Image (spheres, coloured by chain):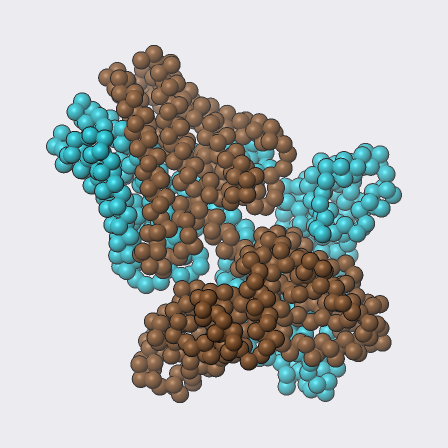
Chain colours: A cyan, B brown
Amino acid sequence: MPFQLTTDFLQKIERLIAQRDGYALKDLLTDIHFADIADILEKLNSDEATYLIKLLESDITSEALTELDDDVREKILDRLSPKEIAEELSEMDTDDAADVVAELDEEIQQKVIDKIEDEELAADIVELISYDEKSAGGLMAKELVKVKETLNMAGCIREMRRQAKNVTRVHSIYVTDQQGILKGRLSLKDLLTAPEKAHISDVYIPKVDYVTVNTEGEEVARIMQKYDLEAIPVVDEEGILVGRITIDDIVDFIKDEAEKDYQLAAGISQDVEADDSILRLTKARLPWLVLGLFGGLGAVFIMQDFEEALENYAILFFYTPLIAAMAGNVGVQSSAIIVQGLANDIVKGSLLNRFLKELGLSLINGIALGLLVILINTIIGKPFDVSLAIGISLLVVIIIAAIVGTFVPILLNKHGIDPAIATGPFITTSNDIFGILIFFYISKFILGF
Amino acid sequence: MPFQLTTDFLQKIERLIAQRDGYALKDLLTDIHFADIADILEKLNSDEATYLIKLLESDITSEALTELDDDVREKILDRLSPKEIAEELSEMDTDDAADVVAELDEEIQQKVIDKIEDEELAADIVELISYDEKSAGGLMAKELVKVKETLNMAGCIREMRRQAKNVTRVHSIYVTDQQGILKGRLSLKDLLTAPEKAHISDVYIPKVDYVTVNTEGEEVARIMQKYDLEAIPVVDEEGILVGRITIDDIVDFIKDEAEKDYQLAAGISQDVEADDSILRLTKARLPWLVLGLFGGLGAVFIMQDFEEALENYAILFFYTPLIAAMAGNVGVQSSAIIVQGLANDIVKGSLLNRFLKELGLSLINGIALGLLVILINTIIGKPFDVSLAIGISLLVVIIIAAIVGTFVPILLNKHGIDPAIATGPFITTSNDIFGILIFFYISKFILGF
């Protein structure tokens, strides 16, 4: 059932654009969902996409614009006049309009805002772009249905019908006092099922979850998920209702955050996609690789320091990639679990408990792997003292890597730094060096070179 | 504003449970949201939690039970009789009830279903547990509001008021024909704003997105996100409306999927959390470490084969951890981008294009890093031929690691295997070995040992 964008269909569109056949294009694209129009726009070059945007009705194109990838949208908006941009904004929800305006260059921003005919919308946008984009204020939309608590149900339904025209989706009707302070809410279902003569003050639910404009986006996501909310009202410092956030915006937020964490863990430092340019991808990847290179050079210098062991214990040098890899793997495992735990707020208990648990876990893993490596070395006929040195080193390296992997994210988090950064090449690289250093010191101690 | 669970509060609850002071407990826990009750239950031991579940009203405890972590819920349900479980189920939405029943042992399942007094609920649960839990059928709930297209608005409102009592949230009213086949939908807003004398057939929206019971959960998530849907109807093979999926269930699904991918990338093979038992965490982590160990042993054997180079070119052995780490890092970067691209359906273009792009990208990174390593080696006074061998090897290793990292996930995906598995220790380990092998062969060729 969902629309499938085929190569044939796309080529047909490109041909019609080349022929400037607006009539046929409009006909072809009738009834196609704005999200699919957005997909089409992303496949076209910027000039073609701009032609389509100017051609189609702005109620469709405005929605399609909000769905576009930032880069694609930027290129199209560059080709539109402030007046044309303002027309698109007029059809958007306030939160989307504010996001688009926030992306524009500052000198264009004011020109575009000046061209918006609806003064209320212009004021809303100015208000919304003033908030931090990751705060509740930056995520919220101004569209909502609110009624004063003194109304009766008939008045409420009238008021709601009047306001609902501007609100795509009505989840709740918010109830305020005369000063606009949030008092409670009324679900649409309540409105439909309550007796017609009741007063709002009799039927509204006074307990309502809300956030303030300064609440961080992650906290909003956590509250909405935990309490299964589809929309949450946003109030200012005085408790006055100023907007609402809906779950679809939070879905995007959650997804973006998860992808960012995943990319950080993989050593990619910007929000990039498989289809981004080579230059952009290089900028996101090269810095982490340079970090890894310097880490590797650190290992080179450590091994040079132990060069005297080469003659009798060359095998130790053959084992360095294994030790480094195990240190890296254990560190990443430990930090990934902690990073997720921190994100989901389930890292409980004291630091001592956490330490003891990680110690126990790494003891089990370390002893199992240490014994395995001693066993294999014995089978292939290596001297026992060397095997023992390798096995014990592996155990110690695993324990230390696990503890570093656990506590670095916790420390970063305490200092307000995104702990996800620790799961990446950062912890792998430092564990590599530490691991090899520990390995040679322990071997030196046991084998006495 | 959100409830904060303090240690003091928790200790008070534990004390009251020990004293079996049900009256004081009920008083203390009045007005606390079920999601917070769930948090409290997770902090108690199983006996304490079971006492609370039996004490509190089942409209609260049933919701709290659905919010609990699987393990905690399982332990509590073990302590409840089939009749007590059935009572909790009666207060749940059908999708949550079916999830709980699906987790029970098979012999208990039937006993519990037999104890459910509401025959319709029992039948709904039996139907829902028959679907694959990751399909639309397994995600959907039976609660929805549906009306026949032949009704007028007054009849529709009556019908809706009757049905809405069982539905926590009404997003849309679904319109069916006499046979129950989905024809379209009517938003609550339409219902409130339409003239009262209109017929449903005049005002309903015939274009409605839907999925079938067999649609995969990931596809449902993709459609709901793409089209910003808050609920989607589910039909069976004949087009008959059988349920609906709401966005809050999909939020959990998206989050779970993202976390699973993240854990796979970090070498953790089960769905575990920081607070799980040591044994469970070990089971999720040890297998990957064993894989890493064998990879490391592979590297040991390769280096043994090149032992004759030790005398003149010991420095090559010092560089193996660096080469292995770079191969691993590049491989993980490449595969992470592809895995995300595959998940978001943005890996477009031909395989040749993808190959050329990855080749270009890794050429840039490889040449930059290769030159850097040659430069550093020259500064610290290493022979130029050795530095050149290392630099060129690094370039080749980076190119191959990038291509392996890109195409392994694509191949896995083509064969229906979760590509996320490739980002983890699997690709790191194989790239480590490949990298070291390539490194020694190229060095041998250049240096002629």
Q: At x 63% / y 86%, what residue is drawn?
A: A202
Q: At x 49% / y 40%, what residue is drawn?
A: B336
Please give left or right for residue B383 compared with residue B57 in the image.
Answer: left
Name the foreground residue: A105 vs A438.
Answer: A438
Residue B422 in sight in this render: yes
Q: Quadrant of residue A173?
A: bottom right
Residue A7 image offset from top left, x and y in percent:
72, 37
Please give left or right for residue B336 compared with residue A117 in the image.
Answer: left
Task: Check the image and report above or below for A300 versus B220.
Answer: above
Viewport quadrant of the C terminus of chain B: top left
Residue A352 image offset from top left, x and y in percent:
26, 59
Residue A300 in sight in this render: no
Residue B256 image offset from top left, x and y in percent:
50, 55
Residue B286 image offset from top left, x and y in percent:
33, 47
Please give left or right for residue B250 compared with residue B196 in the image.
Answer: left
Q: At x 26% / y 46%, what residue is drawn?
A: A368
Q: Quadrant of residue A169?
A: bottom right
The count of marks equals 0
- Residue most extreme to the top: B448
Q: At x 35% / y 51%, what residue is drawn?
A: B283
Task: Check the image and report above or below for A36 versus A187.
Answer: above
- Residue most extreme to the left: A448
